Image (cartoon, rainbow, N blue to C red):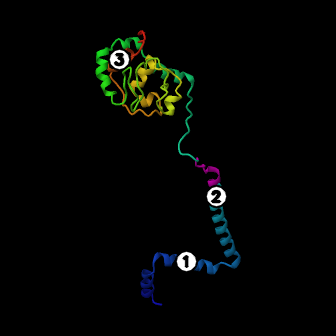
Amino acid sequence: MRLLDAKYLLKKLSNFQIIMLYVQKIINKMDSFEINKVIAAILITVLVIFGIGKISNIIFTVKKPDIAGYKVEVKIDNTTASQASAENQIDISALLALGDIKHGAKVFKKCAACHSVNLDGKNKIGPKLWGVTFRPVGSIADYKYSKALATYGSEWDWEQLNGFLIKPSKWIKGNKMGFAGLKNEKDRASVILYLNENSDSPKPLP
């Protein structure tokens, strides 16, 4: 082959082809024992690399928790319950001092569709309320109370009336009364005074 032809051929070959030709030339010069040593060295290198990878995975693998995040235990003791109870306590004497019986009669019109408050009044959607103050809760014999009221085990004292009138569904959970409640303190105090007045023996105020 002429020199010009050889230069032309080398320009056409890619770098990869040149490298492969060089490697082939080296292999041709090596005997079978040397080739085996090279192959063995390559295999050992591959095994070492993969072995290190596997060992690293075993050592540094972090097990994912079954539940994402951290479990925070909150201890609720009787102190918290007592604080919540204290927050619901009010000065009932100061509250009732805001009330007015005549104003209570006007506010009670919101309740008149479901309750009667007269001496000879009958049960309506709700039980009759004549003499309700300090009467046991759920005690009218001819009225069918919800289980929540029938088993409440208390009486309609000042605190119970006040709490119930704020929001009946919250004060005694599970009762059937759909009334939203009286948020205004004067309205609530006046209704309590009005209910107390409609009784055979009104109770003295605290």
Residue visible at 44% across and 30% down in the picture: 170
Q: Which image quadrant: the C terminus?
A: top left
**Does residue 40 sit above or below 58 in this rendering?**
below
Mark with earlier residue (1, 2): 1
Residue visible at 49% across and 27% down in the picture: 141
Q: Which residues are magenta?
A: 56-65
Q: Nearer the viewer, mark 1 or mark 3?
A: 3
**Does residue 66 sit above or below 122 in this rendering?**
below
Q: Nearer the viewer, mark 1 or mark 2?
A: 2
Q: Quadrant of residue 75?
A: top right
Farthest-out residue, front = 120
Residue visible at 64% across and 50% down in the picture: 59
| Residue marked by disc 1 | 22
Answer left or right for 97 relative to 23.
Answer: left
Kind of residue sitting beneath label 2:
Lys
Q: Quadrant of residue 201?
A: top left
Q: Tags 3 and 2 in contact by the CB under 8 Å rule?
A: no
Query: Relative to the observer, which residue lies in front, 147 or 119?
Result: 119
